[in-house]
Image (cartoon, rainbow, N blue to C red):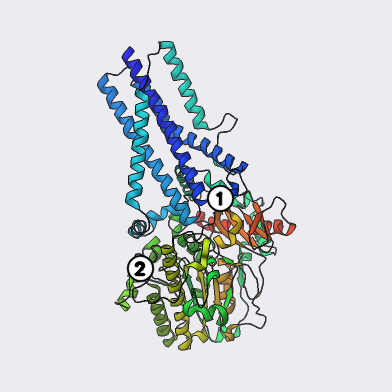
Amino acid sequence: MNSKNKQWVQWHRTFWAILVLSVMGLGLARWVLFYGHTPGLEEAFSTDVKKVFWLGLRFDVKNAAIFIGPWLLISLFFYSASSAVWRVFTRGFSAYAFVFLSVVNLLSVVNYYYFTFYQSPINALIFGLKEDDTQAVLQTLWSDFPVIRLLLLVFGFSAIQLGLARAWGRRGAAFYSTSGWVAMVVVSIFAVVLLGRGSVSKFPLRAMHMTVSSHAFLNQLVPSGLHALLLVRKERKRSQLGDDENVLIKAFGFENWQQAASQCLNAPIKDYAGLQQVLPVHSHAKESPPHVVLTIMEGWGRHLMEFDDPVANDLLGALRPWVQQKADYFGQAISIQHGTHPSLEGLLLDTPITPLTQSIYGYVNYDTARMLPYKKAGYRTVFLTAGPGSWRQLNTVLLKQGFDEVHDETAIRRAYPEASTHTWGVDDEWMFKYGFQLLQEADARGEKVALVMLSVTNHPPHRIPSHYQPFSLDQNKLQAQAATSAVDTLAILQTYQYANHALGEFLNDLERSQLLSRTLFAATGDHNTRMIFSYPDNKNLHNKYGVPLLFYIPEAYRVPSDVVPARSWAGHSDIFPTLWAHSLSEVEVPLSQGHNLYQSEPLSVLGTMSEQGGDGVILSRFGAIANLSRPVFYEWADGGELEHTESPSTELQQVLVQQRSCFALSDWRIRSQALAVK
């Protein structure tokens, strides 16, 4: 019995050593993340930083206790087992401990580089590894990161942790009396339960306790890679919409959807018909319907455009005259989401719920689909992507959302066998050539086309086609603001320039062919440019989510009251209301928070991405708001940055009320249609 007592005590010491060492590893990872991405050393010893590391420690201990703790109870069943059976148990525990430590350490490394890329801890976009082109994602990771060295580091560090734990277990283990052993077991079980609860108060430690600072960067340090993945899995499960269509209506304090709609649309809405509007007569659009083209550019961030220099750092190429003179450039726009597919869904379906079409709800024909008004008006509606049509099942789901056809890289390469390719598809210039040819042929047949294009070149791994000769670029123009090496910065600048130049050449082709005189054109980015800038706090929310927004409306399709606001905030939700107003006549369209940018100057714009631990980001002339559920307010400071305020202006509070109503309405409208189909 003495030998069994001693061997269990040795294992018990190893058990606690594993728990402690795993927590120490997570603490080290948090420290590296902090000092690798901190916005300024002046915060290094602030009270908020101490709170972050203390709360992070509590969550780390809680998660370690949950994953390791059950082995304490399991060990009791093997206490009296034979030596051979006990060895099987201890080896099983060691194997589990090594796997656990390896996973925890791997997720810490992933979280570090994830933050470098997305300016966020692990979030729902990580599921793109499975839902995107998995091979392309893996190729990108292999190309951009030292995968082998990182894996060796992870497994080597995990082996050292396990070795130290086992050595500690064998060191100085003593025999305990029966009463002493029982006391040890009881205390250990109590301690594990308490640690797994994370709190001695009435309520356990939960995600709602994770906000400790007004600095978003510090709040994002609280969850470890493991914890962030657990949170996003829970968030993912919530994308199963449940059975309550009014969940956000209630959460934002509205009695019913009609109240939210009336607030959002500034008009009394009594029934569902009030959510539709028949456009006024547009004589020229009625007599000569124009083509309509929307280009969604991969990684087309607005912030990088600020470093353009036509002589030394030409980021625009052939697009320059269109941004500066020929078209209308809206320089204060943000994306609706922070990833390609989420933004695509938000833009084309007006949905704050994503992923939507990659679930059982993807078979619903949503009446908010932006292509439906064009389809009703007799347009040929086409989606063209430079990548594979099977990506996120676009070639299937879009046919249920108002598109007649989906063309992809296969069709482009069939038309242009010489097209250059890369990890994610064909290069942008070939997509634009194909799109131009499609418009020409349709125009010759007398067809009216509504075309949406999605580019892919400006995506990691950044590279340009071998035949492309870049214009002058100087990464030194970015000075200390670049978060990447000089080599990577130059590669990003080249790819950014190439994509812009290809877009400009497409517009030049339309102009030379005279197609542009009867074509409405809009272009925007799906999200900001990845990697090149770091946004560790919310001083630069407007840049973190900023994308260019470009419109070309032929003179014949403008209306007398059209005005281009000088400093209007705009977003993805404004694109189709603007296009509809200038291309359709007496066609029914869905109402939403979006505006015709030539007829009104929005006071604010809403993005439905997650920020500060909750959904929604608002930018306005009065400031900014993050997390509409538990709002954090910011006001504009000198230098064009945002600073946190505990005393928001009346105007900013009114903006919150207005945008909450629009967010709730959009959520209810999608949710009610999705849940109606069982």
Horizontal side, residue 202 vs residue 403: left or right: right
Horizontal side, residue 58 vs residue 386: left or right: right
Identify the residue position indicated by label 2 in the image: 425
> Residue 473, position in %: x, y?
46, 72
Which numbered disc flags the more N-terminal residue, 1 or 2?
A: 1
Q: Nearer the viewer, residue 378 or 151?
A: 151
The quadrant of the image that shows the N terminus is top left
Please indicate, yes or no, whether residue 552 appears anywhere in the rendered image: no
Horizontal side, residue 89 vs residue 471: left or right: left
Which tag is nearer the camera, tag 1 or tag 2? 1
Q: Nearer the viewer, residue 311 or 279?
A: 311
Label 1 to label 2: alpha-carbon separation: 34 Å
User: How many residues crowd mark 2 within 10 Å: few (<14), some (14–19), many (20+)?
Assistant: many
Identify the residue position indicated by label 1 in the image: 217
- Disc 1 vs disc 2: Cβ atoms closer than 8 Å? no
Q: Seen from this angle, which residue lies furthest right?
A: 650
| Residue drawn at x 41%, y 75% as measured from the top left | 470
Q: Which mark is residue 400?
A: none
SS for dot 2 = strand
> Residue 612, position in %: x, y?
58, 50
User: How many residues crowd mark 1 within 10 Å: few (<14), some (14–19), many (20+)?
Assistant: many
Q: Nearer the viewer, residue 272 or 646?
A: 646
* Amino acid type for the residue under numbered disc 2: Gly
| Residue drawn at x 70%, y 58% as measured from the top left | 652
Q: Seen from this angle, which residue lies furthest left?
A: 84
* Amino acid type for the residue under numbered disc 1: Phe
Q: Quadrant of residue 75?
A: top left
| Image height of 552 relative to 305, above or below | below
> Residue 422, position in %: x, y?
34, 67
| Image height of 614 relative to 172, above or below | below
